[in-house]
Image (cartoon, helix red, strand yellow):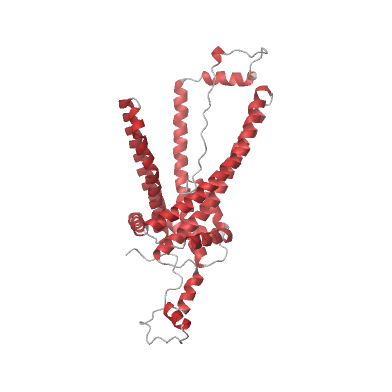
């Protein structure tokens, strides 16, 4: 398995085909395989002002406007909070559907664009790449609905089972299950690897969803260790980039958050400071999506090249051209100093295939 050549070729495609970056960013925004944006959650505790006491200077630690704001939050009835949570759930559901539709368009376009870049190294346009992915929109949407729905049902069942175990054993059962839960980490990783190969089969070989699921499982069994090693390499690259991105975010967020926490209690411009903080968070999100999108483009290129290698295709079209003009048996005779013999018929020495078409042959 030529791991180094695949990574180098993927880097060449990434640098050459900048139009692919847009589709990588769109895939990352919609929750691509390696484009998930994991931001830390922050718990905001609203202080209880019923027992509020001033500080040593006789002044409240918060400005009157902020104190009035918190008091208004405390007065919101429970029914209103339930309506707010229901509205948030509905908005999140609509957002998830929109992102699924976006990913069903962007991901196959990205994969087909990479295939076209492998065949022809000329810089592609956004229109060319989008046109390549449109025919696969329906199959990809059905695939995401099937996988996403199954994963959601499985998650609900798992959470319910864990909740029952926690209630029945007063939490002791969860501690006993902790080592078993740790085993789920490599299992989930292998499932993700299988879904990557299934996605490649669906788009590269132009298969329907059920056939692609079978083909992905076949590829995983036939090339298990090669796929696992490539997955580990790409996961390592993803972790390194994510770690560097996290360092950049920490450098931006922590000083700004400390500054706001020190200034807001004594400032008369609370609204302006909150707007500055909101813009900082927005900038961090955009930066994360940009970096993850670019990373998605590179990693997707590596997976496309890996899958084509599993199918028996060369990494570079020039390799295929050389294989047509100089077969292996002719090269060995040339090294020995003997003139290569002309084949008597085309059936004795059939020429090797040059560059495969964008759609690979149907699954046997």
**In the rendered view, does 229 fall on the left or right side of 52?**
left
The extreme front residue here reads 336
Q: In which quarter of the image is the N terminus?
A: bottom left
**Is residue 37 visible to us here?**
yes
Residue at image position (52%, 38%) is: 39
Placement of 347 over or under 73, stated as above or below: below
Placement of 309 over or under 297, stated as above or below: below
Q: State the residue in front, 200 or 245.
A: 245
Q: State the residue in front, 286 or 304.
A: 304
**In the rendered view, does 219 fall on the left or right side of 278?**
left
Q: Quadrant of the C terminus?
A: bottom left
Residue 143 percent across, percent down from the top left: 38, 51
Residue at image position (46%, 83%) is: 336
**Is residue 138 visible to us here?**
no
Residue 238 percent across, percent down from the top left: 51, 49
Placement of 152 over or under 139, stated as above or below: above
């Amino acid at each position: 398995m030529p791991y180094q050549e695949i990574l180098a070729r993927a880097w060449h495609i990434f640098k050459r085909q900048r139009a692919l970056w847009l589709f990588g960013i769109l895939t990352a925004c919609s929750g691509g395989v390696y484009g998930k944006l994991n931001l830390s959650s922050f718990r905001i505790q609203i202080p209880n002002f019923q027992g509020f006491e001033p500080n040593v200077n006789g002044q409240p630690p918060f400005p009157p406007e902020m104190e009035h704001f918190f008091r208004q939050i405390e007065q919101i009835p429970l029914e209103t909070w339930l309506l707010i949570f229901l509205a948030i759930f509905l908005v999140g559901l609509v957002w998830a559907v929109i992102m699924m539709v976006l990913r069903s368009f962007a991901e196959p376009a990205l994969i087909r664009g990479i295939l076209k870049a492998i065949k022809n190294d000329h810089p592609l346009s956004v229109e060319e790449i989008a046109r390549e992915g449109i025919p696969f929109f329906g199959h990809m949407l059905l695939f995401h609905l099937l996988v996403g729905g199954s994963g959601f049902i499985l998650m609900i069942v798992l959470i319910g089972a864990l909740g029952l175990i926690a209630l029945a054993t007063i939490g002791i059962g969860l501690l006993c299950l902790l080592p078993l839960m740790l085993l789920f980490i490599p299992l989930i990783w292998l499932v993700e690897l299988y879904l990557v190969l299934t996605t490649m089969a669906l788009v590269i070989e132009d298969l329907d969803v059920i056939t692609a699921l079978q083909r992905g499982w076949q590829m995983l069994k036939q090339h298990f260790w090669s796929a696992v090693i490539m997955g580990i390499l790409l996961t390592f690259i993803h972790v390194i980039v994510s770690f560097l991105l996290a360092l950049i975010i920490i450098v931006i967020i922590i000083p700004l958050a400390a500054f706001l926490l020190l200034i807001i209690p004594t400032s008369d411009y609370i609204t302006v400071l909150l707007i500055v903080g909101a813009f900082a968070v927005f900038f961090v999100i955009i930066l994360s999506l940009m970096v993850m999108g670019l990373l998605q483009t590179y990693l997707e290129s590596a997976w496309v090249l890996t899958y084509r290698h599993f199918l028996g295709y060369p990494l570079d079209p020039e390799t295929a051209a050389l294989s047509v003009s100089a077969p292996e048996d002719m090269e060995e005779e040339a090294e020995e100093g003997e003139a290569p013999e002309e084949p008597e018929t085309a059936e004795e020495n059939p020429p090797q295939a040059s560059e495969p078409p964008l759609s690979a042959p149907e699954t046997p």
